[in-house]
Image: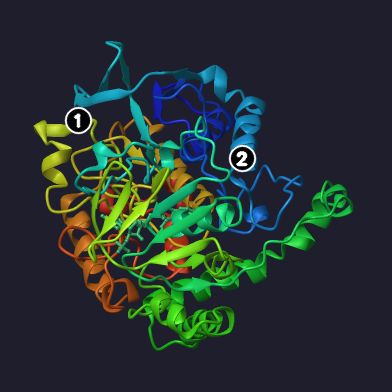
Amino acid sequence: MPNKQPHIIVLGAGMAGILAGIRLQAMGYKNVRLYEKADRVGGTWRENTYPGLTCDVPSHFYTYSFERNPDWTRHLPPGPEIQAYFERTALKYGIDKLTRFGEECSAADYRDGRWHLQFKSGLKDSADILIAATGVLHHPKYPSIPGADQFRGALFHSARWDHTVALEGKRIGVVGNGSTGVQIISALAGTAAQLEHYQRTPQWIMPVENGHFSEQERAAFKDPAVLAHAMNVEEYMASVEAYTQSITDLESDASKAMAQACRDNLEQSVADPALREQLRPDHLPLCKRLVFSPNYYQAIQHPQSQLVTTGIEKIEAEGIRTADGTLHELDVIVYATGFHADSFMRPMAMTGRNGVQLSEFWQDRPKAYLAVTMPEFPNLFMLNGPNGPVGNFSLIDIAEHQWGYVERLMARLDVDDCSEIVPSMAAMNAFEAERVEAAKHTVWYRGGCVSWYLDAEGIPSSWPWNFQRFVDCMAEPDWDAFNLPAPATAE
Ligand code: NAP
């Protein structure tokens, strides 16, 4: 039980905000409030409802460690099941009662040792501790294609799916072939009268199985021991390590094996040599976030599907005109064109100690000491903030490790002589210099592609080391970085 009862505000009731709310209550904090801009929990899984929405992390690893889900129906979790999981977990742990929905924070200022928050509705609140769980990929990126407003059919972004539009028997164009575009094409192939996939840059596709769990399996998984055995955590963690190794060491066996699996998939799955070459990327596998798919190559070879590799010139009333002069007549256009990945808490205006603005602090690129705290922004803790690990593994696991670190930092605030937890600028700068240097050795930088992993200067913004290093960094704060002595209990 804490000695003090600070007022704690969590911004966002997605996966990370729900986690913070659950853990804060378990720690004994009584003055906890979550604010959520939407009308229900779920974050990215609430906002994305496109056909085929799936997470490419194995289902049983895409849960909180303390709240496993025996009921997943498939090996990869379908989006609606993920949203349902977060909704019932939030309900079970009383998160709904702690949350004020429909409240979007527009500004947060640190004054007189507290965070003062202003909401768009006019509401104000203040907190001793602020936790930003505002998500990463939540500001849709719309391409600037001339004539989009002239289109007579339906046009929407994948994260703003218009479910009033019937798709069956329609002529549909999907722009973009990241994980989202690939999942949409895979889901719609065979139902649309005509399905066109607009590909600007080919992507490597990693094959993956996505079978169903049988009723017997799901019943058996209700026994935690059976589920733990089936999950085989060691094997999964080895695959995460192999993944991070292939990112950070291009010469590693792991890197070569993953690249070969992608190449074999293309060779073995696409029959027509011309189509195969159109689908073949000229960058290294893993340079862009790897797309996992059990059936994209089948979907794009469906008789009603067509891969369009000629550039888009403009959109007209009847459809998309490509640079070769062809008009592709369409009823529906979907922008699967991704997100502004560098927004994080923004457009919220944040002002830290000494009037330091977040917009200035992040002028060159979003940055944070070990991805969780920032100099001049005391008692502000970020979950899934800038520079953390991202990739083809569970962000829930990342958030849980970060939360463990936040708990250790918060424990210091519970001690009488400590009122501010804030890393030094020297610690921040040293971390950032080392991170940027390491980032230049990753496949994201050296793999010959452009992706949302890169910042405005072309430097990968994510954690550029292996997963174990992240786990070790989160296990115990380096108190020197916070200009604090090591806590007595740790000695
Ligand atoms: P994305 O990976 O950023 O891909 C955007 C796509 O749109 C790219 O193919 C891009 O082409 C294309 N594009 C953008 N602007 C364009 C334009 N003006 N003209 C033509 N093409 C254009 O976006 P995403 O697929 O939505 O995925 C974003 C992230 O969400 C993923 O990387 C992943 O982290 C997450 N996600 C995860 C899952 C999962 O299974 N876990 C599923 C979906 C999404 P270029 O490559 O040429 O830029």
Ligand 1 within 8 A of label 1's CB?
A: no
Q: What is the count of numbered marks?
A: 2
Give the SS element for disc 2: helix
Is 183 left, or right, of 309 in this rendering?
right
The CA span between labels 1 and 2 is 33 Å
Q: Residue at position x 41%, y 82% from top?
A: 277
Is 341 left, or right, of 411 in this rendering?
left
Residue 307 percent coordinates (x, y): 43, 66
Where residue 474 sits, quadrant-wise, is: bottom left
Q: Residue at position x 83%, y 56% from top?
A: 226
Reading the image, the residue beneath label 2 is 80
Reading the image, the residue beneath label 1 is 349
Residue 77 percent coordinates (x, y): 64, 51
- Give the vertical position of 409 relative to 271 (above or below): above
Label 2 crowd bin: few (<14), some (14–19), many (20+), radius 10 Å = some
Residue 328 percent coordinates (x, y): 35, 55
